[in-house]
Image (cartoon, grey):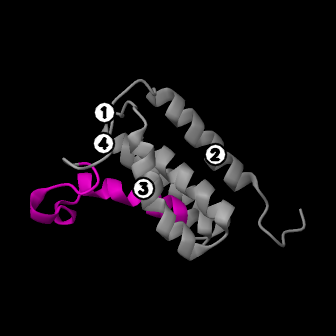
Amino acid sequence: MIVSLHVATGAAAGAATGSRLTSLFVGPILHLAGDRIPHRDIGSRRFEIGSGLLCLFLLAGKRSPLDPATLGGLASSAPDLEHVLPFLRPRGGKLFHGRYGWHRSGRFATQVQLLLAGAIIGGLIAQPKKGDSR
């Protein structure tokens, strides 16, 4: 999956659990599950990074940096850091996306992934936080 959809699915799971610890644990598992779905990737690394960071900043700005949704989004997208940070590749191999990774290429279009990510993030930042009297 594209980074922004990894953020969105992790954020949705974090919001659903309501637990910081659970969202941090479930995030990487959701990443693996998402990459198992045959999908297309966005060719621009700059766009991938930018859209993922935008989603995280929107969540953090609206819900707080330590909200389970924000932490879930961060944890679910974190495995993609091995694409850009060489020190995260033990002995030069990628743990999540290498020979033993679950990444699959297929027909799940990037446009649909972006639309889903936007809808999920939009729904999460539109929700009033518990205790808000809106």
Q: Secondary structure at mark 2?
A: helix
Name the residue carrying label 3.
Answer: 77
- The residue under label 2 is 120
Q: What's the amino acid at mark 3?
A: Ser
Q: Residue furthest front?
A: 100
Q: Residues within 10 Å of mark 4 (few under 14, many from 20)?
A: few
Task: Establish if 132 lies above or below 80.
Answer: below
Disc 3 to disc 2, C-alpha distance: 15 Å
What residue span does the magenta drawing correspond to? Answer: 71-97
Tell me: residue 97, above or below residue 39. Answer: below
Residue 69 left/right relative to 28: right
Label 1 or label 3, whichever comes before in sequence order: 1
Q: Quadrant of the N terminus?
A: top left
What secondary structure is the magenta-colored segment mainly?
Answer: helix
Q: Which amino acid type is shown beneath numbered disc 4? A: Arg
Q: Provide residue 91's location: percent of width, then percent of height.
A: 9, 63
Q: Are marks 2 and 1 in contact (CB under 8 Å)?
A: no
Image quarter for residue 102? top left
Question: Total marks drawn?
Answer: 4
In front here: 81 or 63?
81
Which amino acid, by three-letter code, is at mark 2? Ile
Residues marked 4 and 3 touching at CB (< 8 Å): no
Q: Nearer the viewer, mark 2 or mark 4?
A: 2
Q: Which residue is mark 4?
A: 45
Distance from Cα at disc 4 to Cα at disc 3: 14 Å
